[in-house]
Image: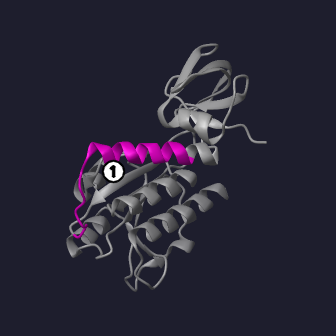
Amino acid sequence: MRTARFFCDTINQNGAVIISDIQFRHIARVLRLKQGDMVELFDGKGTVAQAIIEKIAKDSALLKVQDKKIFDSENRRKIIIAASIAKAHKFELIIAKCTELGIDRIIPVIFQRTVKQADSEMSARRFEAIAVESAKQCGRIFLPLIDKPLSFEKALENLRTDFPKAEIIFGSLEENAGSIINFDFEADVIAFIGPEGGLTEVEENLLLKVGAKPLRLTDTILRIETAAIAFASILAANRAAR
């Protein structure tokens, strides 16, 4: 049976850890774990530990760290998905599936034709919580970086600064767009997924100006979440095949 995993911000060797809130409910009410049971802890930054449950109280659990391992930062090509903001539950799906697929950074982007959504700290916390739950389920050690919503221009500027050698691609239905199946990347890759209304001519020209490649999935118009997850899946499979 697979050891249950739980997220913990700080993990100290042979130290005590208190688990509360959602993580505690998973321990006590979903899995019904007991004193003496062993679990796995991870901090999303490379630390993984085995811990034993020493006490379960009304609203928290006390764990004792038994063994801790620190993994080096993932030395591989980075995959960044910069997708148009969609309705909350749709972007939550993007967060969950991109986390499972091992995407390194996820950016909610405001394009000219993006349907404006409420901008709140609650949404940001919700996205982080979804990434944690997805990482718990799939066994991922490092959590993806999730940016706050950015304008298209600002997202492009930031990403070109952070990943100066990255290849940039974007979803397109134009006849001259190649198939993503034939796209092979040697360095980091940034994929821009526009809104369902499509990129404006100005946005597309700006991408082309910086050397971005237009790529297509199908000949049909896709929803934002479909396109983002499909791009992420193909890019992740390409990376894993190396």
Residue 174 coordinates in the image, percent (x, y): 37, 83
Quadrant location of the C terminus in the rendered image: bottom right
Instruction: Kindly report the secondary structure that dominates the magenta region of the rendered protein.
Output: helix
Which portion, as a residue range, is magenta?
Answer: 113-134
Of 84 and 5, nearer the camera is 5
Residue 152 picture location, percent across and down: 26, 59
Q: Which residue is mark 1?
A: 160
Q: Position of residue 171 (x, y in %)?
A: 40, 72
Residue 130 seen anywhere in this rendered image of the structure: yes
The residue at 57%/53% (across/down) is 100
Give me the residue at 62% from left, 61% from top: 237
Q: Residue at x 53, y 21 (%)?
A: 18
- Note whether residue 76 is visible: no
Please tell me whether residue 103 belongs to the stretch shown in magenta.
no
Looking at the image, residue 15 lies above or below residue 190: above
In front of the other: 84 or 169: 84
